[in-house]
Image: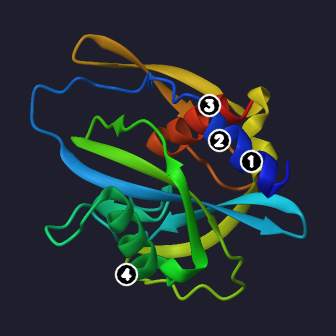
């Protein structure tokens, strides 16, 4: 898939309602993540990070750059861009925002807005090792193949929820990251 095909498919589809809502009775904290799509020798890749192992929440997990909304953020896009620069040094001038996916509610009390964007390939990300242990790319085509989508039922407070897994090489991509990639794949296929 080329960048033009990606943009056309993404922008021409209505956003599906995410199946990943926990309907928490509590007020959810707002967060935004960036789904950076990078063109590498004509192949589209998704940029992902591996969280630092010393973090209290979700240590060592695979994620998108992003985080919680701060009072000075003007929008969810601003949050995603700020967090991306803080975490991996990718500046907003190197990012072309295409739009967003339907928000995703986590069991841990967040409502995450995924922002989809093209990002300039960078061979030397300047990541914050207090937050990020590694930056890597996965071919977009990996996430578009249904055989890479694994759903495992999980019960929380008497309700069944699907936990998504999309392993790639030595990386176990699961949870919110995999669910968001699942939602993106529904738009692109």
Which quarter of the image is occupied by the C terminus? Answer: top right
Distance of label 2 from label 3 (alpha carbons): 6 Å
From the image, tell me which residue sits under label 2: 10
From the image, tell me which residue sits under label 4: 130
Residue 120 in the image: above or below residue 66: below
Helix, strand or loop at label 4? It is loop
Mark 1 or mark 3: name the one nearer the start of the chain. 1
Mark 2 Cα-neighbour bin, 10 Å: few <14, some 14–19, many ≥20: many
Q: Nearer the viewer, residue 60 or 175?
A: 175
From the image, tell me which residue sits under label 1: 6
Q: Are marks 2 and 3 in contact (CB under 8 Å)?
A: yes
Answer with left or right where residue 136 lies relative to residue 177. Answer: right
Answer with left or right where residue 178 lies relative to residue 175. Answer: right
Q: Are marks 1 and 4 in contact (CB under 8 Å)?
A: no
Q: Position of residue 76 (x, y in %)?
A: 32, 57
Q: Nearer the viewer, residue 135 or 74?
A: 74
């Amino acid at each position: 898939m080329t960048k033009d095909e990606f943009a056309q498919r993404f922008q021409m589809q209505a956003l599906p309602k995410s199946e990943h809502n926990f309907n928490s009775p509590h007020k959810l904290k707002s967060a935004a993540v960036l789904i950076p799509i990078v063109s590498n020798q004509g192949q589209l890749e998704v940029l992902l990070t591996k969280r630092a192992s010393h973090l209290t929440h979700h240590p060592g997990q695979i994620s998108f750059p992003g985080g919680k909304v701060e009072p000075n953020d003007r929008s969810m896009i601003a949050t995603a861009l700020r967090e991306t620069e803080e975490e991996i040094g990718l500046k907003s001038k190197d990012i072309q925002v295409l739009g967003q996916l339907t928000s995703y509610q986590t069991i841990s009390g967040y409502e995450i807005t995924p922002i989809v964007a093209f990002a300039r390939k960078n061979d030397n990300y300047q990541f914050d090792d207090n937050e990020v242990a590694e930056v890597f790319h996965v071919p977009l085509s990996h996430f578009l193949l249904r055989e890479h989508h694994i759903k495992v039922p999980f019960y929380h407070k008497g309700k069944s929820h699907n936990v998504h897994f999309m392993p790639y090489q030595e990386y176990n991509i699961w949870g919110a990251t995999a669910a968001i990639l699942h939602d993106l794949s529904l738009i692109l296929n």
